[in-house]
Image (cartoon, rainbow, N blue to C red):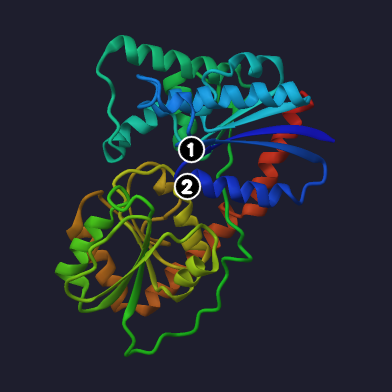
Amino acid sequence: MYRLGFVMEQTLGHVTHDRNLRQWLAADGSIIPHWMPVEFQADDLFQRLPLVRGNWSLRASLRARRLVAAALRRERLDGLLFHTQVTSLFSVGHMRARPAIVSLDATPLNLDTVGAAYDHARSGIRAVEALKNGLNRRAFRAARHLVAWSQWAKDSLAADYGIPPGKVTVIPPGVDLGRWCFERSPRPKSAPVRLLFVGGDFRRKGGELLLRAYRERLADCCELDIATRDDVDASGPGCVRVHRGLRPNTPELMALFEQADVFVFPTLGDCLPIAVMEAMAAELPVVASRVGALHEEVVDGVTGFLVPPGDAGALAERVEALCRDPGRRADMGLAGRKRAEERFDGSRNYAALLGLYKRCVDGRC
């Protein structure tokens, strides 16, 4: 039996990743897991300390170090997996004492390229940037192995942090293809096309841009469902339905995917969003922004379209084309499902992650 620690960041799509990993791990009888969720907000000292309270990397790594130290006082752990690297920065000693994996969707320098959408900016102070770079390099080097969600992130680890490519394995997250498979019957010609947008952070995920495009050009040809945690003004032309607070993988959220015809995701900044994988598994054509590693999910012109971030005109043009052509919607949806089966099968990808983890503990990675 393997006694394995899982230090998991609890923000954004990482919450879904955590839940999916727990689901697939439950089927592996060779692992006794010790879960250490690292919350974004917590009633602790780190939430109140000046300098620390406003810096997620510092809060996450300090909370993670406390969680790991407490776990190791109670029991022996054969290994540690940190997701993402922001949880690992102050646990280097623990990582050197036992096999450890650092898993990440993006490097800090990857995030700098999309940081404006996250209200994140480089400090501009050379000493601060050097310290940040040094802490991440130290954690990456202390890990026995690194798991990158995308080639985009793996390339940055090599080019920006000097990590040998052989120390990094690309394993994307995945979805339960059985649950995300819906029977799709032809929609009556008189029925309006239904668009679906899913994004907790409405502004960053491009929700405001989509609403503008919808009101100006799309309201006459389609309806729009929005699933988000934020308040949204749904007034104006057309039919806009807002669904707030839906949790990942719930029947209510999945019903929206089943009822939709096109998934629209004009995000202003992202890495490798799981919502896009879910849409592809659900046989929906995807119209998304060309940012981060989205080009590794959506094949432009085959499984959907990629448009420049912030370009409402290009977004509306691509959506209009799909609204007019049900055959193309169906073809792209089927191509997306095939790509999800090939690259984002949760059963295969999470098994690969757990298999790599066990090999590292055995000294074979």
Q: Is residue 59 above or below residue 325?
A: above
Tell me which corner region of the image, top left, top right, bottom left or bottom right, holds residue 195: bottom left
- Left or right: residue 14 versus residue 236 is right
Q: Quadrant of the N terminus?
A: top right
Task: Please state which of the two labelled residues, at mark 1 or mark 2, is closer to the viewer.
Answer: 2
The percent position of residue 53, horizontal first and vertical second, equals 38, 26
Disc 1 secondary structure class: loop
Give whichever of discs 1 and 2 has the lower sequence position.
2
Q: Amino acid at mark 1?
A: Asp
What's the residue at 17%, 68% (across, down)?
215
Q: Amino acid at mark 2?
A: Gly
In this view, the residue in front, 143 or 252, is: 252
Q: Residues within 10 Å of mark 2 (few under 14, many from 20)?
A: some
- Left or right: residue 222 versus residue 139 is left
The percent position of residue 109, horizontal first and vertical second, equals 38, 27
Q: Which mark is residue 105?
A: 1
Tell me which corner region of the image, top left, top right, bottom left or bottom right, holds residue 49: top left
Q: Are marks 1 and 2 in contact (CB under 8 Å)?
A: yes
Residue assigned mark 2? 13
What's the residue at 52%, 40% (across, down)?
149
- Left or right: residue 365 versus residue 226 is right
The percent position of residue 211, horizontal first and vertical second, equals 22, 63
Q: Residues within 10 Å of mark 1 (few under 14, many from 20)?
A: many
Q: Total marks drawn?
A: 2
Outermost residue to the left: 216
